[in-house]
Image (tube, grey):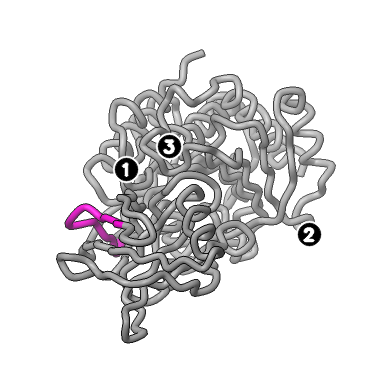
Amino acid sequence: MELPIVDYLSDKIGERVGGTKEEKKASEFLSKWMKEMGLKVEVQEFKFLGWKPTREATLRVLEPEKMEIKPGLMLFSDNTPEGGVTGKLEYAGIMFLIENLFEWPKYAVVNDEGNQLAYIVAFLDGPTISFPLTKMGRCYGRAPYVLIGKKEYKLFKRWMDKGKDVVVNVNISGEILPHLTSQNVIGMLMGKEVNAEEIIVCAHYDSAYGSPGANDNASGVEAMLKVAEKIIKKETAKTIKFIAFGAEEYLMIGSSYYVESLKEKGQVKKIKAVINLDMVGAGNTLTIAYDQKQFDQKIIKKSIDRSRLKPCVKMQSVKLSESSDHWPFYINGVPTIEMNFWPYNHYHQITDTKDKIKANIVDRTAAAAYALLEELVFRY
């Protein structure tokens, strides 16, 4: 089975961080693709605050053993001096980047005077990743931060549990980019009714720093457009929007802008449901996140049964978290569902490449999303 969207976004373009020319190229490709499908297309530009590294981040362990570790970037980190900062690691609690999902141990790099010079945060679900030091526009405070992975965390913890001092040198530098531009690509299948209610199917098309983003999230865009292909020839009373959101990896900048623009016009209430597809091309466990107060579980079960997903993958239903583009809608009262395969060993990695994607998983996730969309459009 062909995956043309995954192929173009992750292989032909590759890394496409929000606000870059690569992300812009991806948006132009998707806009053209949607128009050729027969959707009415609108491109919504927005400005946002970005960040980029200005030198390679390093993490050197000096005691109890000497070693070099390649750290992950924490976007919006403050800078160390050119030679970095050196100190002993002290446990500094848990960093709640995304509650109930990303709650990571944090270590302070402390000098002889007791000053905390930098922080090391441990990602516990796999290798080192890059991740923003923000949460829906709220910053954790300007200080130098880097990330380590599960393997390095276990090593540091084992040393510290044995009473050994862990002395490190952390070096990171970046700059704030105050006027970046990204864009949301909105494909519309207009409803027959005047002032029609809306259903949104969405997926972000940008990638994390250092990653070609095949699963995260070219796979979601592929699945979204497969859903569009299935329903585009049907007449509906409701308007269906297929939205490829930009700058999601800066923590939902594009979707937040979209929702805020609707709030200004008093149009949020027109949206009756949102289906968000994020990382749906690899893995064994499909996570379906939704609020049981918003959706009848029978509707979701019926849709999954129709898609033939169940024999192929495990499924679990969880509460919604502040993890992707569904969240700005959810906190504004819109019923939302997220489909996501987690965990994924190549999350935010250079190894998140198209060869990791299983076409049958993308197709069956798209079938599940389509079955759910049909329920919402024609029967809900």
| Disc number for residue 154 | none
Q: Is residue 226 magenta?
A: no
Q: Give 160 or 287, whichever is nearer the viewer.
A: 160
Q: Mark 3 and mark 1: span between their CA atoms?
A: 33 Å
Amino acid type, label 3: Lys
Residue at position x 65%, y 40% in the image: 237
Q: Position of residue 150 (x, y in %)?
A: 51, 50
* Left or right for 296, reference 241: right
Instruction: Determine the image quadrant of residue 24.
Output: top left
Q: Residues within 10 Å of mark 3 (few under 14, many from 20)?
A: some
**Above or below — where is 87 with respect to 156?**
below
Image quadrant occupied by the C terminus: top right
Closer to the N terminus: mark 2 or mark 3?
3
Look at label 1 and name its amino acid: Gly
Q: Quadrant of residue 363?
A: top right
Looking at the rendered structure, the number of numbered marks drawn on it comes to 3
Could you tell me if the residues under marks 2 and 3 are in contact, i.e. CB atoms within 8 Å? no
**Identity of the residue drawn at 51% across and 13% down:** 1
Dominant SS in magenta: strand
Residue 197 drawn at (x, y percent): 62, 50
Marks 2 and 1 sit apart, C-alpha to C-alpha, by 39 Å
* Residue 210: image tag: 1
Q: Which residues are magenta?
A: 48-60
Disc 3 + disc 1, Cβ < 8 Å:
no
In the image, residue 166 above or below residue 14: below
- Nearer the N terminus, badge 3 or badge 1? 3
Judging by the rendered image, the residue that carries numbered circle 2 is 293
The label on residue 40 is 3
